[in-house]
Amino acid sequence: MNDDEPLVRWQWIADHAAELADYTAVHLRLGLLPVLFGLIISVPLGILCHRLRRLYPPVLTVANILYSIPSLALFMIFVRYTGLTEQTVMIPLTLYTLSVLVPNVVDGLASVPEPVRLAATAMGFGTVRRVVQVELPIAVPVVIAGVRVAAVSSISLVAVGQLIGQGGLGYYITRGLQLDFPTPIVTAMVLIMLLALTTDALLVLAQRLLTPWSRSKVTAA
Amino acid sequence: MIRFDAVSKNYPNGTTAVDDLSLELAEGGITVLVGPSGCGKTTTLRMINRMVEPTTGTVSLRGRDIREVNAPELRRGIGYVIQHAGLFPHRTVLDNIATVPLLLGWSRKKARARAAELLELVGLPAEMAKRYPNQLSGGQQQRVGVARALGADPPVLLMDEPFSAVDPIVRAELQAEFIRLQKELHKTIVFVTHDIDEAIKLGNNIAVFRTGGRLAQFDTPERLLTSPADEFVADFVGHDRGIRRLSFVKAAEVPLREGPVLSATSPVAEARAVKEPWVLVVDDARRPLGWAPVAELPDSGTLVDVQLAPLGHTFSLVGDSARAALDSALLSPARLAVGVDADGAVVGAADVHEITGSPGGGDR
């Protein structure tokens, strides 16, 4: 790297603003859709594991083994089936979220106090209604805690997808390396961190709005 | 109304929770199931709304085998209150109370109007409606639990140790409130407790269970205290059952004698002439003022000038039980209970022997 080259050339950022915005949108999609898909898989899987406790240890083991496979290797495996597409990035990222989301759904359901479950049954809730109207809403704070971890990790992992040409803002990191030009690298890094932190803040806000009951701990006289 | 026919509940691990129970619970009264832990009282309760299915035998409700009814549907017609209230933490107090009406498909507006009514019925202020359960005290939560159970005005109410998780003062309050509510509502209530005092206080009928899920005795509280079926029941109702059964004898049945009663205007000499160690001094309306110690009386004058020993307390012939009379006798310096009428005027006195020898209070 040229010693005179500054870490950030502001002019470059100004010139590429529109393009940066496009890549940011792609990055967000590549990072967050897997969390959504992960949630869609984890909720029913978590409910199943909660009801059939024997199922939980093997499911958790599989999820953890998936998480332990390096993302690069997983991308390469999926390239054979889905080519150099966005799916090839999103499928592994979806699988990664399971190791956080499944246990959080299970723990969330386990956090429902036994008297509450009992009362719901005694009031005449059927099983499905009880899970949907009582148990899942009470599990929300624990589930959202998992979603926060999954979302942040997923957003930062997207960049690795650049190795198969689908890395969102990761594009600028490889670009910068190739051109020996630090500005795009620093810009992409900061944007990715901002995305992760903003997403996290929004999830905290969502939780406050969804579960007003979980914080108002004012004991009456 | 609720009938158990040769009902047993056995678990695969070999334990028997309920053993060959046959029992008929009358409509419109409070039946208390009581016994030590592991005696099957909660299992028995839960068989009424099919939260536990019997291994053998049948349970019927108003002549109908409850297995003929779909379980969630059956449960919506039976109120249920549990120990820790079990309120839904994610729903407001009002929506908690509206639970069963909403399950029954009432409109939200109608369900909430009904819930607001119930909130008032259980003695909670309207501004509690919008609170969440974790913002209430234990006693308030339990009241909401009762209101929720009454949601769809079910004829039957099952209560599983509803007042045992709160402190004794709140418990007494909730019990009193519960008795008042029942006078108004006339529900058929099955109430589980391990506390024999609570059972005697609340029950119209009491079923005592022994370990192993066997019914030891099914009787009125009074009969339970006077004629326990066996050693186990006698032990379980406690060693003060002799005193406690007096609470079922009306004070009006206590034989009273005139006793050493004198007006405050009587001369001291008259008190000495009574030949008793203590004389009860009354005012013009025969209301009791206190006890005069005869041995310490001055030589002359009237009883007005005498320093009187406090009464302890009197018992009312219109509202009290023989137990209150006994207490009154024990607290009086003369060891005499003073019975008063509705106006507070002295009717007569009785000592411990006379009180405990009164009809129903004596040896059976």
Image (tube, coloured by chain):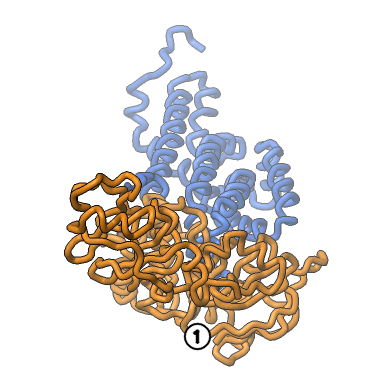
Along the viewing direction, whichever of A179 and A18 lies nearer the viewer: A18
Query: Residue at left 71%, top 39%?
Result: A69
How far from the left and from the top, in percent, is residue B177? 37, 65
Q: Residue sitting at 24 percent across and 60 percent down?
A: B282
Q: Which residue is mark 1?
A: B27
Given residues B150 and A71, the one toward you in this image is B150
Position of residue A20 measured from the top left corner of the image (x, y, whole percent) = 40, 35
User: Where is residue B14 drawn, in percent x and y?
Assistant: 82, 66
**Mark 1 residue crowding within 10 angstroms, few (<14) / some (14–19) / many (20+):** some
Residue, x 54% and y 76% (percent of image)? Answer: B31
Locate residue A131, reporting x and y percent.
54, 64
| Residue found 58% across the figure and 70% down from its top | B225
Q: Quadrant of residue A188?
A: top left
Image height of A97 relative to B183, above or below? above
- Chain A colour? blue
Q: Inspect the image, locate mark 1, and give the three-letter code of the amino acid beneath it.
A: Glu
* Tint applied to chain B in the drawing: orange
The residue nearer to you, when weighing B362 against B93, is: B362
Chain containing the residue with disc 1: B
Can residue A3 be seen here? The reply is: yes
Front-most of A6 and A209? A209
